[in-house]
Amino acid sequence: MSPPLVSLDHITRRFGALMANDDVSLAVLPGEIHALLGENGAGKSTLVKILYGLIQPDSGSISLDGKAMRFGSPQEARAAGIGMVFQHFSLFENLTVAENIALVLPAKAGLKRLDQRISAIATRYGLPLDPQRPVWSLSAGERQRVEIVRALIQEPRVLVLDEPTSVLTPQEATTLFATLKRLKAEGKALIYISHKLEEVRQLCDRASILRAGRLVATCDPKAYSAHQLGELMMGRDIGAVRPPSGDAVGAVRLRLKDLSLAAPDLHGVSLHEISLEVREGEVLGVAGIAGNGQSELFAALSGESRTLAEAIVIGGHAVGDQGINRRRALDAAFVPEERNGHAAVGAMNLADNLFLSRHALPGLLRHGFIDKSALLARTDEVIAGFDVRTAGPEAAARTLSGGNLQKFVVGRELARQPRLLVINQPTWGVDALAAAAIRQAIVELATRGAAVLVISQDLDELYEVSDRLCALAHGHLSVPRPASELDRSAIGLLMGGANQFTAGAAHVS
Amino acid sequence: MSSVFFQAVAATIIASSIPLILAAIGELVAERSGMLNLGVEGMMLMGAVCGFIGAYFSSSTLVGALCGVAAGLAMASLYGLLTIGFAVNQVAAGLALTIFGQGLSGLIGAHYVGLKRDGAPHLHLPWLSGLPYVGHMLFGEDGFVYAALALVAGVAWFLRYSRAGLNLRAVGDNPASAHALGMSVGGTRLMAVLFGGACAGLSGAYLTLAYTPFWSPGLSAGRGWIALALVVFASWKPWRVVLGALLFGGATILQLQAQALGIRLPSQMLSALPYVVTILALILLNLRRYRGSLTPAALGLPFVADT
């Protein structure tokens, strides 16, 4: 076995009381793709930020080619040959591709010869790019290419990729894997962070698993099933979501007919003649990469954006021009994507947050005043019913972890036993246990006879909960099809916008 | 139109647009880094009074101008300390700076009201300055005019081609990413704010050293606010600042000329003309919003690194 190209030895870093990394050691060989696995908050990001010079470790050392290194800043790490592709795009919208790339190069490099260098990298690794395009005009896949080219142009020997496929269609991910395999063949060391365990099993040579800041295992991911890897990450059994029954489908609860909506702002997406039906007892999944109209569709459904009355019909009532209170009164419930600031007010306590989504409904008011005891009782029910870990109904929403707050905002709506639930990205940034609980609750709600519309980027999630699936691409919705008849590559093509030319024809037939 | 009359009108339009150009080009740089400094008016007044006092005692326009720049820098560093050091709300800090500048400049300048000194000397080149129509306009201005144009050209080049300018735009667009790439967000923003303050101070000094040339309290008369509007009007593009400033300067002069020619319009209405133009320009700009406008994405947003 060749000596490691890069190794992190006994890294420890604490933030206040939190041990983000506790004596973590990691060695990556040349020509190896090394997966770094772990739940949110397990310490993966801290570890790679230490390698990239963004965070300084409290103790421990980094060595490259056996030589001890200290990176006081990302510039030093880059100069030593460490490249990083960030999880959330770290690009600058109003700058061109070339300018974005120039920012990581030494100041003297200049913009003049840069275009040729970008083209050279692009052809070598199959990453076509137009250097003069402004970044805001690029798709998610193209942005990812900019991130990767920006890392590669510095000729790194070690490349860190933080959840690179979370915003890609399956086809784009396949292209990315081909690029990564070429880098591997060139003898580079790759550190690959991902939540997608199947992907890790296919691509990676070894995997290191972090749990609560500690390294719990380094193993060959191909020797384990995805489920076993998940258990290693969690330290306990996750349990599979019981699939929806799909046979007790009732009347149409939500009908959209030719819903069109102009983009609300500069970087928004317009919706184009979206038609669909959701029946009681079924879950309809809407797949799509973020930024294809999901937020706009949710806003139209919840009443934050108004449309023609007939475009949205809930339980036989045309409500397209009505606000959210009228829709809630029709037994509809809405859970937006962003927990902080949209679904919940961080500075307010849980009971008040519960009141915010129910103030126009009967039950919590007495003679026009808030019925405090009823409100606390309802809040306690949600906390107990959905296993929300919190100090109690008087705790401020912002003191809850992401997963617990998400369980609370979902539970708040489900506790009303709505007959229609619209939920956007139900488990985004939530740990696996909370995610499984939320998905299970969605499926059970449908089993009890509610109509559910789930908008999500996570295909695994959609296949777990949905009876029927469709995809939103550039504001166009594909025709919903039974989930069992639609395989991943087909839905991937629809997410990439392949339906745009056929959807109209399908409507007519 | 005779050559003399034309040159006189052109000279007044240019003279009234120079303070706008100077203040706006500085604010433009600050805003491109994401700093919305509403204290331009206050920084201008401090530059005006300190510039006048400096020139009064030294009998040198250059020393006066430098005093004005220093006053603007001092005010801007106060703003930078509040907004970058303590992450205070930028709008509140900017408004406070303006009110502070109005009061302090009045206090400092109390003993200098009504004192006079000669205006800044104008360039005189034999033959060239005497050319009909364009001679005075091109070769007979004072130093501030040439300095203002050089500043605009310098800023345009800096933002478009220099690496530091690229860093500055990146910080204004996405400070979190800039930080992740290892740039100093606070440092870059402080430099931009200081440049803005220096320009506003110079603009104020121009008012008391060349434009009027004397000191009276509040003599900037809202030019700081017009400069702020001008930055938006110019869509954060340097050369459009010159265009906009000439337009606003022209509107001011048009109002004076119309009164002189006895056009029967209420003088208050004509005085309001530049401001009406500002509002119309802002509305028009907002009507044609398009993706990827030049508006710095992080304008007005504080940045605090989380590590």
Image (cartoon, helix red, strand yellow):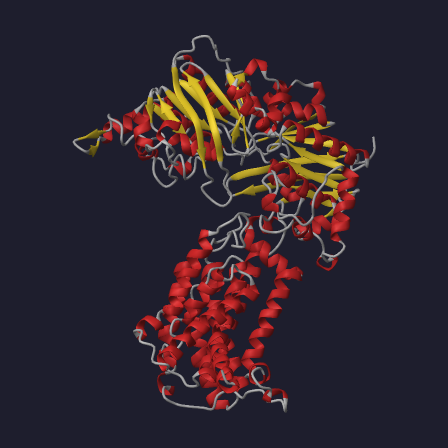
In the displayed orientation, state which residue is furthest to the left. Answer: A367
**Vertical relation: A363 (above or below) B249:** above
Kindly tell me whether residue A386 is visible in this rendering.
no
**Vertical relation: B238 (above or below) A49:** below
- Which residue is depicted at the point 78% across and 40% down? A123
Kindly tell me whether residue A472 is visible in this rendering.
yes
Seen from the viewer's position, the closer of residues A166 and A466 is: A466
In the displayed orientation, state which residue is furthest to the front. Answer: B1
In the displayed orientation, state which residue is furthest to the top. Answer: A247
**Vertical relation: A507 (above or below) A293:** above
Seen from the viewer's position, the closer of residues A310 and B183 is: A310
Seen from the viewer's position, the closer of residues B76 and A24 is: B76
The image position of residue B273, as x and y in percent, is 38, 69
Q: How many numbered badges does the structure rendering display?
A: 0
Seen from the viewer's position, the closer of residues B173 and A139 is: A139
Q: Quadrant of residue A380?
A: top left
- Which residue is depicted at the point 37% across and 41% down? A347
The image position of residue A147, as x and y in percent, is 66, 42
In the displayed orientation, state which residue is furthest to the right. Answer: A2
**Vertical relation: A107 (above or below) B13:** above
The image position of residue A171, as x and y in percent, is 67, 28
